[in-house]
Amino acid sequence: MSIETLPESSIPITTTLRPRFGFLTATPIIAAATIYLVLIVLVSILAPLIAPHDPILLAPAQRLKPASAQFLLGTDAYGRDLLSRVIHGGRVSLLIGAGSAILAVAIGLLIGLFSGFFKLLDAVMMRVMDGLMAIPSILLAIAVVSLSGAGIWTVLVAITIPEIPRVARLVRSIVLSAREEPYVEAAVSLGSSLPKIMWRHLMPNTIAPLIVQGTYVCAWAILTEAILSFLGAGISPETPTWGNIMAEGRQYFQLKPSLIFWPGLLLSITILSINLIGDAARDALDPRMKRREAK
């Protein structure tokens, strides 16, 4: 009697595990965006050591100087070194972006978890979130800064507040779906404590979407800070940020376009890189995207 052999599976089996953050180098474009962000973060952290001059030192005799060996990008209208200001400006812009993303995700996660699990609390909290989302984020940020005064922490809070409802609604929608799963119902019926249900059964479902949402919040926060500074409603002009540098240089744009070009270029590439990484994270962490690729 012959033994029939089973046909080989059409699904390839890989022996190596894919890195957890392998999407950061999935394509050449994503890899370039990752390398750029790593470099810009390192340069911003080491700004006091890398910057050739004091970014806030006034030197009227050196105002609007062209690029030279002493001033590689020239000087601004107050004689300050443009390169040093651009390097230090990245510190504030990235701090605002990362800080807003962390705060919005943390607060939105708590609101979304409790709103999605408790129906009575959901009715109240979501109406508050809807009210915040009805106000344009820029106008709300300007109002907060106007009431509290300009400052890094004030701008950080002003940019974070409009982003919290978006994160909360995302987490709420995930929790509403996850709480109907059998494993959650089993944990409730067995008398598991509320913190245990939240921490072990509900919150893990929100990690992947929150990573993606956090990248978008970070990019939008950096852009919003630049908009507020450009409008004169952000951080004080003495503090170098990409938005402040462009706001001060717009009066001299025809005379010296580099005052706007360099901070604007870094701002654009930074936001583009963060969005590209966010898209790559969404494609890698979303099971539906993986099923589409498998087909």
Image (cartoon, helix red, strand yellow):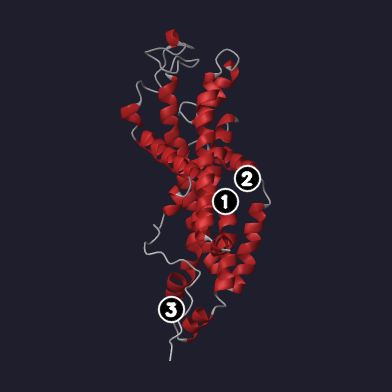
Spot occupied by residue 12 in the image (x, y as percentages of width and height): 46, 66
Where does the image place residue 264, in percent across and percent down from the top left?
54, 29
First of labels 2, 1 by sequence position: 2
Q: Which residue is mark 2?
A: 137
Q: Amino acid at mark 1?
A: Glu
Question: What label sits on residue 141 in the rendered view?
Answer: none
Instruction: Name the quadrant of the N terminus.
Output: bottom left
Q: Outermost residue toward the left?
A: 49
Q: Residue furthest bottom?
A: 1
What residue do we see at 40% from left, 59% from top? 18
Does residue 80 show up?
yes
- Say which residue appears at 60% left-offset and 61% top-offset: 169
Count of numbered circles in the view: 3
Q: Position of residue 46 (x, y in %)?
A: 33, 33
Q: Which residue is mark 3?
A: 193
Nearest to N terminus: mark 1 or mark 3: 1
Badges 2 and 3: C-beta atoms under 8 Å apart?
Answer: no
Is 16 positioned to the left or the right of 160 in the image?
A: left
What secondary structure is found at the residue carrying circle 3?
loop
Q: Are marks 2 and 1 in contact (CB under 8 Å)?
A: yes
Horizontally, residue 125 falls left or right of residue 269, namely right
